[in-house]
Amino acid sequence: MISLEDNYQTNFSFTQEQVNAFAELTGDTNPIHIDEEFASKTPFKKPIMHGFLSASIFSRVLGTEFPGNGSVYLSQTMNFLRPMFVDEEYQATFTVTDIDSKRKTAIIKTEIIALSNKKITVKGEAKLMHKTLID
């Protein structure tokens, strides 16, 4: 059973090879993500990860780790606050902020924090159904 204020965190990173695979899979081949020479001429000075690749950690965790298998992802809001880079360590955090037992849903605050400087790179809110709320 999930409860208000339950929380979870996990560390992760992505490689340039994973970014390239995401670009190929989605068709988003913007050179800001995959071309070092192009990216070197931008304010970021090096390739940045796709926002949706970085936020895919939310889907992984909410679908399998917290609150666990059996979740049905209903919606997600996101604000991309800072660029994210390959081979850097990040921490995704999740906190249950609301439970609607009548609708059998939960609202979970989602954030990604850069471990190098402790700044939030992505923040948002997920809504999901979970087996402990449905049963």
Image (spheres, helix red, strand yellow):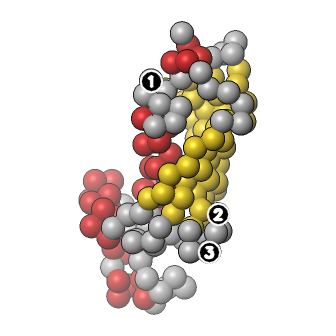
Label annotation for residue 117: 3
Q: CA distance from mark 2 to mark 1?
A: 28 Å
Q: Residue at 51% of width from left, 36% of height from top?
A: 66
Q: What is the distance, in whole Å, between disc 3 and disc 2 at their CAs? A: 9 Å
Residue at image location 57% in from the left, 67% down from the top = 114
Between 89 and 36, the residue placed more toward the observer is 89
Number of the front mark, 3 or 2 = 3
Which dot marks residue 5? Answer: none
- Front one among 32 and 86: 86
Give the image location of residue 115, x and y in percent: 56, 68
Q: Amino acid at mark 3?
A: Asn
Q: Amino acid at mark 2?
A: Ile
Q: Secondary structure at mark 2?
A: strand
Residue 70's tag is 1
Residue at horizontal 69 percent and vertical 16 percent from the top: 101
**Helix, strand, or loop for circle 1?**
loop
CA neighbours of label 2 inside 10 A, class few (<14), some (14 to 19), many (20+): some
